[in-house]
Image (cartoon, coloured by chain):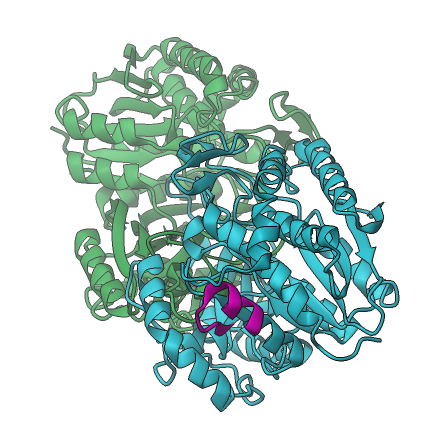
Chain colours: A cyan, B green
Amino acid sequence: MTAIRDDIHTVIEGRHDAILADFQALLRIPSISALPAHDPDTLRAADYVLGMLRAAKLEHVRLIETTGKPLLYADWLHAPGKPTVLLYAHYDVQPVDPRSEWDSDPFDPIIQDDYIIARGACDDKNNLTAIIHAAGALLAEGSLPVNVRFLIEGEEESGGEVIEEYVQSHPKELASDIVVIADGGIAGHDQPQLEYGCRGMVYVEILARGPKRDLHSGTYGGNAPNPLFALATIIAGLKKPDGTITIPGLSKTVRPPSEMEWANWRKQIPRFEEDMQADTGTALIGDPAQPPIMRAWAQPTMEVHGFVGGFQDDGSKTVIPAEAKVKVSLRLVPDQDPAKMLKLLQKRVAKLTPPGITSEVVNLGLGMPFFTDPTSPAFTASVRALEAEFDKEVWLSRAGGSVPIATTLQTVLKADTVMVGFGLESDGAHSPNEHTHLPTFFRGVRSFARMLRAFGEIDGGR
Amino acid sequence: MTAIRDDIHTVIEGRHDAILADFQALLRIPSISALPAHDPDTLRAADYVLGMLRAAKLEHVRLIETTGKPLLYADWLHAPGKPTVLLYAHYDVQPVDPRSEWDSDPFDPIIQDDYIIARGACDDKNNLTAIIHAAGALLAEGSLPVNVRFLIEGEEESGGEVIEEYVQSHPKELASDIVVIADGGIAGHDQPQLEYGCRGMVYVEILARGPKRDLHSGTYGGNAPNPLFALATIIAGLKKPDGTITIPGLSKTVRPPSEMEWANWRKQIPRFEEDMQADTGTALIGDPAQPPIMRAWAQPTMEVHGFVGGFQDDGSKTVIPAEAKVKVSLRLVPDQDPAKMLKLLQKRVAKLTPPGITSEVVNLGLGMPFFTDPTSPAFTASVRALEAEFDKEVWLSRAGGSVPIATTLQTVLKADTVMVGFGLESDGAHSPNEHTHLPTFFRGVRSFARMLRAFGEIDGGR
């Protein structure tokens, strides 16, 4: 904690109580977007956030009705000649089950030592509270040097379709030069991190149809084609046991990381491999030609998520099902095009389909890989801001997961996009006893304020 | 219908009304053993059958309490120097779902043209009614030439463990020379059939364990081993796409059918392949070195019945599950020993298990293949009886399925065992609108009576 004490500290420290009060109040609202029973709570959380935006003296604060949970918008556009920054976060949370594994009420935040424990504490009510208060503090001080827009959603944990649609259809209303996705993570309490890329996605169901009806495996076994067996052979034909994907042409357009990226990643390898080892608790596997960090950030993967069909209860029913399906995803990296990768997958599945079976690859969703140039002015400014706060070199990372809204905002707005956040992997997002480290949370508020200031030093605007 | 009219016709025809009344009364009782809500009905059915046994003037009629549904026993042992014949059938039925696909109430038997429609009409209340009335008619006429024992169970459709245990522990009380399993099928209304063999079984769950907890496929995909993928590669490694099993040593002890068997099967090939084609509605597959009838009756098969684990609902969750399992069965033929085949399977699975995964093959049940010499006196007598009734050459068949109680009775009692019954595959056992052809049902009663008479012509007894 060797951070430079400056006026940002003063500005934010004077507001600690109010910031914490908002954070706690938000955590008390069980805004679980996946469960319809919690729809009133989700609306209550939206309403509370609207109040925070108003209290921060933002303008045009409004709730945008959608076919799903409402979006929240606000702006402040009084910095002519300066960049416009769109700040994104979400007010919904994951369900709490298994409830029995929580040591306290998930919606009664308690503070133990330096930690606050509640559902949403690290995903994403911490970052949501932080961005509003960071902008509010600068506004109150008369020192917000950029234009800002807030776009906040309420179903990130349960679909996220309405914001995609809204952004696609409102490019002018949202016009911005820089996008900050305040839903990322940090590598350690003392290790700042910014993410400039994440993987795209092809998610499919492979259907296999065989006999015209379910059959008894005694009478028909040996003569009737079995759709579940067919799917097993198809899956086994998509990847070698060591993890190398065997879909011809799939890796042709994979762009290797730049020298600058690789130099930055090399520093992160020990922590990455240690974390990966600790989180999985088993031997790592994967394409032996690539180190683990490359396999997660710069290489495509294929995973199978579930087989549907046949008999899945306890006991020993002997059925050859008429049909079955399997859920499969590809994660993609630049410059893999999801629609083209889907075609390659479909071609491979057709080739692997055994006699007596017809197969079909059903597209459940495509997502472009996200990539922003980490040497762009927005990124360089973000690095400066975090280094000022942490007094430590910032790690520039990609992520293995997929953040569709990052890709959409970047593509539609043609804005440099930075993913940042202040929860750790070990804080347990989506898990029981989710928590956040309060000193790191307040560092987050200061970091966002510093970023807004640093963006103000960038030339231009529109 | 060119059967020889003789005294058996006279004896049985005089009883048609009483036989049909009992059959209908039994069909009205929803004795679904799999559903605890129907336990009182199952007891009611047991009670009704006890009444039928008493009315047939059988002796020692009694209900045997078990840990499951009761067994029913009766005997008549007044034919010294003659064989003792144990007659087996069951009084329970399958559930009726999907109920909406029934055109009439499954437990209100209706007669349309020559068919009676109800759950249990062809499995197994027809054969149960027939064996009791066949013995009862001969007893009433003073012409039952053999000793008989009835052993009737009430959970054939939902486990069948209690009868296994009872037979194992009561070999003396059940001592018999011949066993008739009255739960088989017939090839056609005018095509008599006797079964002398069926396949054994190894049923397992293969468990695969990978990461210590469920993981996000974005963050961990490419580095974490996926138990579902591991199971797919294991399954794909047990059998070629064409159906040939690839478990070393598995087929070494397969005994080829005898010349006499093969001569008998050859006649059945056209109907077998036509039925197989019609029932599956798709191209047949299987070991190309074997004709379809051999693949079903004289060769082992491996089938996969269901994968458990991961995400199986609608939509697109991206999870790498910590563990998963798959249900797999082998069907076995003489002289494959189930315990030894299980070991070969376990060895093969261990070899196919990919890096990062631990696997375990859990035995859910072993069953010996069943085989009785089709030239034994009991079989020859059965053939004579059915040829007298149908005036047509009897098909001697094996079955692809497994009938554990046939193996157990044969092994424990060291008795020649004949599987016979009068339902057709097309009668829809276990399906909506289950039915039986009434003229064939009455032929069944006559056939059982003729078999008992024919057994009386066999020398010996104990």
From the viewer's perspective, tell me whether residue B52 is left or right of residue A145.
left
At a point 53% along the width and 50% down the height, the residue shown is A442
Q: Does residue B363 lie above or below B95 as drawn?
A: below
Q: Position of residue B209 (x, y in %)?
A: 31, 55
Residue closer to the observer: A383 or B248: A383
From the viewer's perspective, tell me whether residue B427 is left or right of residue A242.
right
Q: Position of residue A263 (x, y in %)?
A: 43, 85
Asked whether residue B210 is in view, the answer is no
From the viewer's perspective, tell me whether residue A139 is left or right of residue B436.
right
Q: Quadrant of the C terminus of chain B?
A: top left
Residue closer to the observer: B240 or A221: B240
Residue closer to the observer: A318 or B403: A318
Asked if residue A393 is among those painted magenta in the image, a careful observer would answer yes
At a point 66% along the width and 42% down the height, the residue shown is A33
Asked whether residue B212 is in view, the answer is yes
At a point 47% along the width and 40% down the height, the residue shown is A116
Tally of numbered discs: 0
Q: Position of residue B399 (x, y in %)?
A: 38, 51
Q: Which residues are magenta?
A: A384-397
Q: Does residue A38 lie above or below A5 as drawn?
A: above
At a point 42% along the width and 26% down the height, the residue shown is B128
| Residue B158, image quadrant | top left
Residue closer to the observer: A435 or B37: A435
Q: Position of residue B295 (x, y in %)?
A: 39, 64
| Residue A322, image quadrant | bottom right
Asked if residue B101 is among those painted magenta in the image, a careful observer would answer no
Q: Quadrant of the N terminus of chain B?
A: top right
